[in-house]
Image: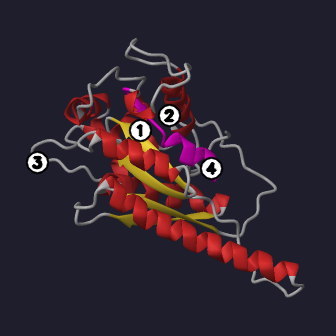
Amino acid sequence: MSRRRGAPQGGAPSRRRTGRNRRRQDVYAYVEGGTEHDYLRYLNSQFGGDLGFHLNIDIDRAKGMTPAQMLSVAETKARELANEEGHADRARSSGRPAPERTKVLPVWVFFDRDDNPEDELARVHDRAACCRVNVAFSHPCFELWLYLHLADSPGPQGGQRARLHDRLRRVHSAYVDYAASRGSKRLDAARCAALAGQEGLAVRRARALVAYCDTGQCDHRVDGCRTLDRDPSTGVYLLLEALGIVPP
């Protein structure tokens, strides 16, 4: 018998979620690069059917948009969805039948610390909190989220993605040429297979990085610790919680 897609490694069966609304929930994600795009497509194929969601992915193919510009695009979508929700609410209050719709989760935008200006990222975080857009922020880069599927915290990276790429190449054979001189950063079937079944473990590791500062220079449990200072850390686990892939 073949293993069910998404089952944890070791043959343990996945817990089937019952009582869920099976109408599709459209979720909107705005990303900077192809790796994030491939990963979100993987979530669609691995979990979207069972959990009733679909990630609509918008990628900055020209790689020329600033974080603020990407947030503006995401904010436009968030306003559009809010207007649709308002129309439906007014239709119900007037006694007219409202168009059938599914609950739309918040819009998401993905950013890395790496080369982005710190002051702009700080403004993006502040502005996103006011416009119904969730930020999945990774320090130093999105690859940390992939790494946490395969190993514990790599330790502080000093904001350098090259160091994390090197550790990722050494932690699993599927990533041996990741971002190397002739290696791609795209997630093919083998690289996605290396992640399958490890979502819960990655989430626990990501939560631990948020709960405790790996640098020893600050404590994330102390009020005032900025997201931008958490080296390393990633907020991608929040999306998996929102989609129901892992419990919050």
Residue contact at pointers 1 and 2, CB within 8 angstroms: yes
User: Residue 242's mark?
Assistant: 4
Report which residue position mark 2 lands on: 202
Of marks 1 and 2, which one's residue comes earlier in the chain? Answer: 1
Residue at (75%, 83%) from the top-left corner? 99
Residue 10 image point, x, y percent: 55, 33
Residue contact at pointers 3 and 2, CB within 8 angstroms: no
Mark 4 crowdedness (10 Å alpha carbons): few <14, some 14-19, many ≥20 = few
Residue 207 among magenta residues: no
Q: Amino acid at mark 3?
A: Arg
Report which residue position mark 1 lands on: 145
Q: Amino acid at mark 4?
A: Ala
Q: CA distance from mark 4 to mark 1?
A: 16 Å
Mark 2 crowdedness (10 Å alpha carbons): few <14, some 14-19, many ≥20 = many
Q: Nearer the viewer, mark 3 or mark 2?
A: 2
Of marks 4 and 2, which one's residue comes earlier in the chain? Answer: 2
Residue 16 image point, x, y percent: 72, 49
Q: Nearer the viewer, mark 4 or mark 2?
A: 4
Q: CA distance from mark 3 to mark 2?
A: 28 Å
Residue at (39%, 13%) from the top-left corner? 217
State the residue lying farthest toward the bottom: 96
User: Residue 182's mark?
Assistant: 3
Q: Amino acid at mark 2?
A: Ala
- Which element is circle 2 on? helix
Q: Is residue 167 above or below residue 36?
A: above
Asked if residue 57 shows in the view, the reply is no
